[in-house]
Amino acid sequence: MAPRRTPRPAAALALAAGLLALSACSADGRAPGPEASRSMPEATFVFANAAAAPTLDPATTSTVETSRIAAQMLEGLVRADPSTGEPVPALATSWERSADGRSYTFELRDGVRFHDGTALDAAAVCANFDRWESHAADGARTSFATVFRTATGGSLYGACTVESDSSVELSLTSARTPVLRALTQPAFGIASPAALASGTQGSHPVGTGPFRFESGDGTRLVLSANPDYWGELGDIGTLEFRTVAEPELRYVALRLGQVDGYDQVGLDSFAPLAREGVQVFQRDPYSVSYLGINQNVAPLDDPDVRAAIASAVDRGAIVREHYPDGTRVADQFLPARFAMDGTDLQVPAYDPQRAKELLEASSYDGEPLRFYYPRNTSRTYMQEPEKIYADIAAQLVRAGFVIEPVPVDWSDGYVQQVQDPDGDHALHLLGWNGGYRDPDYFMGALFGAPDGEFAIDDPSLFGAVDRAAALPDGEERSRAYASINDRLSRVLPAVPLAHPISAVAVGGSVTSFPLTSTGYEDFNQVRLAPAP
């Protein structure tokens, strides 16, 4: 795939001085587990993330970096089939759904142990569910809270019950189609109860996965192959995740052999990588980027003002200039793979004259609008947020808006700031990356409950999202989501911008890389060429 801009290899090489050399990895002093008859992999693999993981506990955040790292150490009852996204066995070898759809009984895999040596059993599984419910009860915006609808006053979660050491029942207050698919997320990885009791899950996860924690944090982390792993270890003995926020530095690090792969290939790097014969794997579009609008900030509660904002933004130009080829201009929030497109979409097309007319007829009186945007990051849904901000801000100013820029480093809690119910964000750039194969992952998280990001106060919308999630797969469910897409295009809680592709680049030692649309790749599935 060819980019649209001239690459800048000289500038990139000049930035290389900012890279840290790979330092020696220190262990945490833990005695190694007993090795079975299999041989242990010895290769070291370094992967560059585009941002630091704010925590290593996936139950408390939905960032791609946290989920990717945690997925190497924690496993859930089920995992997603890489082709279909449907649940397949993981820590549970089988499960049975009750006739009324209100309970699932899981049979656990025999002989599995956590990294600390304790055995996996039903009590350990329920200890995790109890912890997730506790976090949600405290008002945390978590995957558990979204899936089980704890913020809407009627939680779907019933109980986790130990049926026997190897059997556990998850009961719901009502049937819900996405629940089993939702459990494939790293957020539902089962951790050692002893580790949970110690309170160190955010800095030192202890799971059952193919890799175990050695040292470091969300900025730079070292994992080692788990000698007691019940499944396949693969080719990597030492796995390091390193944060390299600048796209050009990630490119240089790969070309200099300082990393073996990296996420979020920058636009300027596609052509040089192709010329140099470097493998680049592209993810299918499974995310949405958007311009968020906070209706708590007057006059953004005025529909004419929101329509003027949408009319002023040239989404086609934004996609052409700032996203890789293959990215789709968005007019709704669900990616195309769901085939649940609205039938009466009314997101205004780019029309600067219409934007001026709407603004003149609205309640807007020249108030500065604080426009938040992230710095020093590349996201799956937005590689160049600073440049996208600059273009959108200029378009809004031309339409007659007064814009006050508010740049915030991604690592300084950008997401928390633009989701704060008491925040002063009027406009903001953000997006949502698919975490499991169901439309409720997008609709439930973004528009299923009141929040501080968009400040929507529409119980009937929340009810429509909840009803769609409860419907069985089929035509009625598809129509329900198409209707919600139509409704959102009229309400305009945000302006959808793009359904982007993203890409991973890997070095010559890699013969196979298990790319996923979610970004939660399993590194024990990476295949490396034999050492010379």
Image: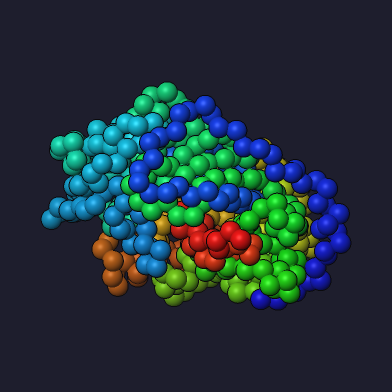
**In the rendering, at what x and y percent does residue 151 appear?**
39, 40
Q: Is residue 38 visible?
A: yes
Number of marks in the rendered image: 0
Q: Is residue 371 visible?
A: no
Picture colour scheme:
rainbow
368 with respect to 462 (left or right)? right
Would you identify the image quadrant in which residue 149 lies? top left
**In the rendering, at what x and y percent does residue 512 appear?**
52, 65
User: Which quadrant is the N terminus positioned in?
Assistant: bottom right
User: Which quadrant is the C terminus positioned in?
Assistant: bottom right
101 with respect to 469 (left or right)? left
As displayed, is residue 306 above or below residue 285? Answer: above
Q: Nearer the viewer, residue 131 or 491?
A: 131
Looking at the image, which residue sits at the far left? 99
Q: Nearer the viewer, residue 333 or 456?
A: 333
As displayed, is residue 118 above or below residue 439? Answer: above
Looking at the image, which residue sits at the far top? 198
**In the rendering, at what x and y percent does residue 342 appear?**
45, 71
- What's the residue at 21%, 47% (across, down)? 106
Q: Nearer the viewer, residue 460 or 498?
A: 498
- What's the residue at 73%, 66% (across, down)? 269
